[in-house]
């Protein structure tokens, strides 16, 4: 069983740039953290047949794994430092697939100026599972949290909503293919620059991974407030707009589907101008979608002001 | 699919003590690192059917997962700060098994004064896979490495060698059961206290996870030296001693079997007294097992001084 030797050899160059990785020769990575900073650490897993389809391009799987983790750092307003990778390969390793995975990983590590700091490769009889730990940092005491939303805050959402879950639906044959949707499903854009820039402005932030309704629910619950979202204000891509005009039943998937990895922000009204400047500097579109009120839970209102209800608020990973 | 809700609920109390976990309510954990310290991070995975047997007590699986990761920190001379857990459960979650896992995890986190800082729980159709990231710290610039061994250094090994691989053999029915072996297989003792105390004394350290011959090989290769080990000096438990006296063919398993998680240290001769004091303070037995020479590779000599050879130097995880 030498398959992980191959993976280890392929991964080694991805660590070369970073002295923190110790060249992957030791049992652990060692990182200095500046005295005015704190370390931010997150771990996300992805499994074949659950978070991606069995025939998916391994390069895209690797890149999504990186991006999903970076999105967690973005939601905290953190900068990214590096990653640890856990690669549980199938015993009957497909060498080409491993090469493609490492290629994709390397491409995104370069894109985000990150190094591979360490990790583990195991082989096992069953399906592939990947685990990634992303390490980042924030100025001391300034991490953005989910729990800071206050009544009176305005709600903003970055990018567009729904493309990723519609991309998944298209991949499954439930919808006609739109390449833009599918690309968004495979390659979310972690909003790192936006997260860092809004850190001093926003009261609360969360990334939309489980679905807007579910993630807004997390913010509402931890903040002890009610979130009211106007469906008509939600930012949509042209493809999604067209679909919803013709088949409004897809609204549920857009609102609860998850995988968009956009940032939902709660911002005090007096922060609005700073927020717009931050979004511009981060080159990230930002739409006003609702407000925070006293109370609890999440209400999404349709164009007539009626509250919508959802049997399943979000995707369960 | 709400199975991970159960796991999440069970895990939450393990994070309550640590403000760094943010109560597991956010996307990431936030840790302060003192200005004179560096962060140490490691990730190890375990899979059903590969690193443990399918019917194994999930509490023991959890505890081994913690200990295997802490052993990596011990080898760097680090203190442990906390962990991130990745739990890829089977879709048809066995609730009792999940409860037992979290119970075992909680027990060891308490034992090692560690907190659960974050992580991810996913469900998937195939076998269970666990991933753990352990975070620790060392004084700046003082992490113990594998690569520092020099010709003239003495080699030391903590604890006893071979109990864990013999325990696995017993579990598989290849050997008569000895409870002490089996316990060592399930519950290695990460040598954290020893690692911290020998950090200023030793030139190099590695934990024996793949097998003594393989891990000594890692130290030899990264240090650019030759390691010569005298088999007669290896510290053995009474059970192992008895077995080897009767069935010397088990020597190979003892030397290459892995899973012992003892520390192999390279120490300059003038550090010997300090080393003995450190071992005493850490209450960890330490045996002199050989020396470092110029050259490359690992030589294990038998009682007559003949070099032994091994078809497979170690366990491939």
Image: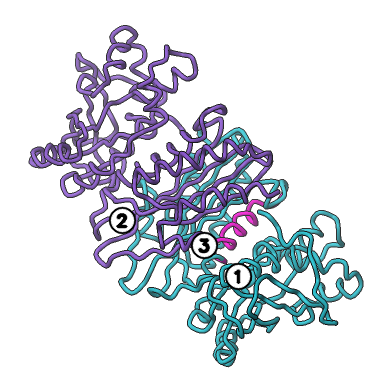
Chain colours: A cyan, B purple
Q: Is residue A235 magenta?
A: no
Q: Quadrant of residue A263?
A: bottom right
Residue B118 position, x and y percent, is 49, 56
Left or right: A199 in relation to A141: right
Q: Marks 2 and 1: in contact by CB < 8 Å?
A: no
Q: Residues within 10 Å of mark 1 (few under 14, many from 20)?
A: many
The residue lying at 70 percent from left, 65 percent from top is A211
Left or right: B212 in relation to B3: left
Numbered mark located on residue B137 in the image: 2
Q: Residues within 10 Å of mark 2 (few under 14, many from 20)?
A: many
Residue A186 versus residue B60 in the image, above or below? below
Numbered mark located on residue A219 in the image: 1
Q: What residue did someone put label 3 on?
A: A109
Kindly report the secondary structure that dominates the magenta region of the rendered protein. Answer: helix
**Circle 1 chain:** A
Q: Which residues are magenta?
A: A56-71
**Circle 2 chain:** B
The residue lying at 84 percent from left, 66 percent from top is A250
């Amino acid at each position: 069983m030498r398959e992980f030797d191959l993976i280890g050899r392929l991964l080694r160059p991805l660590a070369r740039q970073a002295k923190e990785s110790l060249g992957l020769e030791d049992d652990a990575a060692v990182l200095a953290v500046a005295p005015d900073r704190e370390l931010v650490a997150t771990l996300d897993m992805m499994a074949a047949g659950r978070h991606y389809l069995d025939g998916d391009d391994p390069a895209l799987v690797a890149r999504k794994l990186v991006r999903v983790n970076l999105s967690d750092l973005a939601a905290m307003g953190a900068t990214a430092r590096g990653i640890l990778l856990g690669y549980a390969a199938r015993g009957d390793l497909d060498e080409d697939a491993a090469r493609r995975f490492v290629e994709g990983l390397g491409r995104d590590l370069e894109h985000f100026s990150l190094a591979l700091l360490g990790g583990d490769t195991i082989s096992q009889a069953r399906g592939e599972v990947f685990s990634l730990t992303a390490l980042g940092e924030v100025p001391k005491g300034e991490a953005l949290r989910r729990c800071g939303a206050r009544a009176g805050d305005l709600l903003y959402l970055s990018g567009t909503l729904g493309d990723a879950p519609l991309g998944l639906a298209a991949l499954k044959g439930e919808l006609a293919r739109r390449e833009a949707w599918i690309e968004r499903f495979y390659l979310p854009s972690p909003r790192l620059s936006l997260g860092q820039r809004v850190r001093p402005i926003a009261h609360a932030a969360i990334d939309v991974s489980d679905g807007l309704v579910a993630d807004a629910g997390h913010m509402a619950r931890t903040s002890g407030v009610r979130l009211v979202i106007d469906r008509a204000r939600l930012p949509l891509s042209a493809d999604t707009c067209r679909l919803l005009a013709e088949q409004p039943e897809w609204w549920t998937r857009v609102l609860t589907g998850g995988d968009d990895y956009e940032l939902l922000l709660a911002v005090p009204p007096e922060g609005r101008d700073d927020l717009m400047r931050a979004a511009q500097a981060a080159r990230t579109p930002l739409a006003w979608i609702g407000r925070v009120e006293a109370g609890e839970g999440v209400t999404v209102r349709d164009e007539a002001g009626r509250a919508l209800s959802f049997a399943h608020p979000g995707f369960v990973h």
